[in-house]
Amino acid sequence: MNEVAARNEYYERLAPSNLAPLWEVLSKLVTREPVTESVPCHWRYDEIRPLVLEAGGLIRAEEAERRVLILQNPGLGERVGATETLFAGLQMILPNEVAPAHRHTPSALRFIVEGDGKAFTSVDGERAYMQVGDLVLTPNWAWHDHGHEGDVPMVWLDGLDIPLLRQLGPVFVEHYPRAQFPSNRAPGSTTALYGQNMRPVDDSFEQPHSPMFHYPYAQARAALDALAGSTDPDPRRGWCMEYIDPTRGGPIMPTLSAFLSLLPAGFAGRVRQTTEGQVFSCVEGTGRTVIDPDGKEPIVFEWGPRDHFVIPTWVPYRHEIDEQAVVFNYSDAGVQKLLGLYREQ
Ligand code: 1HN
């Protein structure tokens, strides 16, 4: 028997004992640089909006529990996700609907894409009425439901850490016995306590996420203008600010980091390559994101307001801006930094 045949015969006898030879897979398992199955991906809002709205005629929010179209990365096959660690979806809620109260271990953020400010998310009994561009958090194990008191559909981007949690294991959900969690505080109560650069001296809040759960667009947008008035833009990210947990100064939640960037007209960004996987949601302006794979045709995403796109781990990309743009994005940068894994070049 030659060497190859002898090895294969040996491998066949290993398999029934649930054994396998590492040396046959080692170079695929530990690579010189990150390798991902998820691929860069772009969803144009004008193409998918009719499909998002159509769901409203096919299933009610109550029946769906959450009427969400998954932004599914085609590279991940049957695994639900926008990247290896991040879920992305577009949720739609119609006037007078309720998306019933539940809580789960996956952490979630919502970034409002379309609507009139009369729909709300209730987080542990406090409502956040949502305007376009607002960021709303529902951290690990917080009760949350959505309601709508206005007269036009509301659509938002849901970002969750579900793929990461499924790998780690601890995925749990609990349904509240009634559709809505009882209101127990006026809207704005949490911001009044934690959003003023102060906190109560005897504060007992010790969760590993931000106590704040509503980050209005008007404030974030004003902060970007102030930054633009005082510094030059970063050559890769433009004027970029991170939404923070005011009690720690770090990411809003351990597994999800969120950012808002202002990119000036004519900006020709340098190439950025980072280990974080990223989901982008465009708010204002137009531009393109160019991915130049080694020796292959460049991939170009021409985007405008309400478009979404994904840049997986270690994919080099750059932004070119036509009209001044504001772009939101979320990523797994925070959890990578906690683990000492984050790199960027
Ligand atoms: C969820 O609970 C929400 O609460 C949205 O709005 C999207 C995707 C997967 C699992 C749970 C929500 C979700 C989700």
Image (cartoon, rainbow, N blue to C red):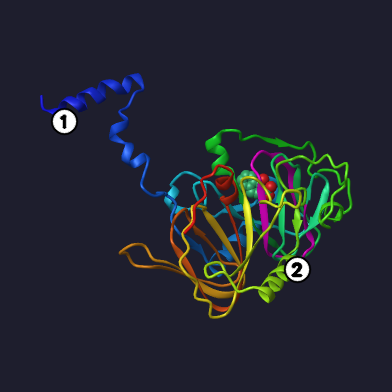
- Choose the circle earlier in sequence order: 2 or 1: 1
Q: Is residue 280 magenta?
A: no
User: Counting other residues with Cα less than 10 Å from the Cα at mark 1, is it few (<14), some (14-19), or many (20 or more)?
Assistant: few
Image quarter for residue 101? top right
> 108 left or right of 185?
left
**Residue 142 drawn at (x, y percent):** 74, 42
Say whether residue 119 is magenta. Answer: yes
Q: Nearer the viewer, residue 180 or 192?
A: 192
Residue matched to label 1: 4
Extent of the magenta region: 98-121
Q: Position of residue 240 (x, y in %)?
A: 62, 65
Q: Quadrant of the N terminus?
A: top left
Q: Is 24 drawn above or below residue 108 in the view shown?
A: above
Front position in the image: 18 or 45: 18
Which label sits on residue 135? none
| Percent x, y of residue 239 | 62, 69
Q: Nearer the viewer, residue 185 or 327?
A: 327
Label 1, secondary structure: give it. Answer: helix
Residue type marked 1: Val
Specify few, some or many for label 2: CA neighbours under 10 Å numbering under 14, 14-19, or 20 or more: few
Q: Main secondary structure of the magenta part?
A: strand
Can the viewer see residue 60? no
Q: Residue furthest left?
A: 1
Q: Quadrant of residue 155?
A: bottom right
Q: Which residue is mark 2?
A: 218
| Beta carbon at label 2 within 8 Å of ligand 1 | no
Q: Give amino acid for label 2.
A: Ala
Residue sitting farthest toward the front: 231
Element type at mark 2: helix
